[in-house]
Amino acid sequence: MAHKSSEVSDMFDIEPRTLFVYESEHLIAPERTPTQRRRYSRRDIERVRLIRELTTVSGINLAGVKVIFSLMEAASKQRLPLPEADFPELAAARHLWE
């Protein structure tokens, strides 16, 4: 089931503009309806959850999140192991890059 921007922003108590920033930074990629409205998949929502965790809990800025996401994508493509003990939130989210 796809969700509207307003639904996702309510889930995380963020402004819809924040979702647009995440999209412009290529951290999420919502689908578009024929009328160009954004629809967020479960994967998009999981990525937003991880972005929020990294930024609010770990204090990482969006530039850092982009680097982490790039590294996760590369690790997934190369089937490299992750140091799960040190980064359990990333290890648990590995499926987002597969």
Image (cartoon, helix red, strand yellow):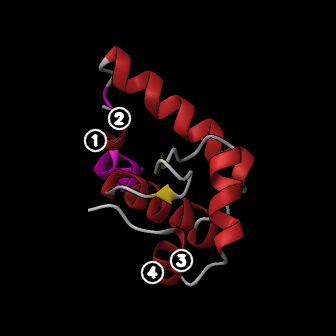
Among numbered discs 2 and 3, the one appearing first in the sequence: 3
Q: Which quadrant would residue 97 be assigned to in this image?
A: top left
Question: From the viewer's perspective, is the residue at label 3 or at label 1 nearer?
Answer: 3
- The residue where tag 4 is placed is 11
- The residue where tag 1 is placed is 95
Residue shown at the point (52%, 30%) measured from the top left: 71
Q: Which secondary structure dominates the residues rendered in magenta?
A: loop
Q: Tell me the magenta residue range.
A: 81-93
Number of other residues with Cα within 10 Å of mark 4, as a class: few under 14, some 14 to 19, many 20 or more: few
Q: Rounded to the nearest whole Å, what is the CA distance between mark 2 and mark 4?
A: 29 Å
Q: Rounded to the nearest whole Å, what is the CA distance between mark 1 and mark 4?
A: 21 Å
Badge 4 marks a residue whose secondary structure is: helix
- The residue where tag 2 is placed is 82
Q: Rounded to the nearest whole Å, what is the CA distance between mark 3 and mark 1?
A: 25 Å
**Amino acid on which the number 4 mark rests in the picture:** Met
Badge 3 marks a residue whose secondary structure is: helix
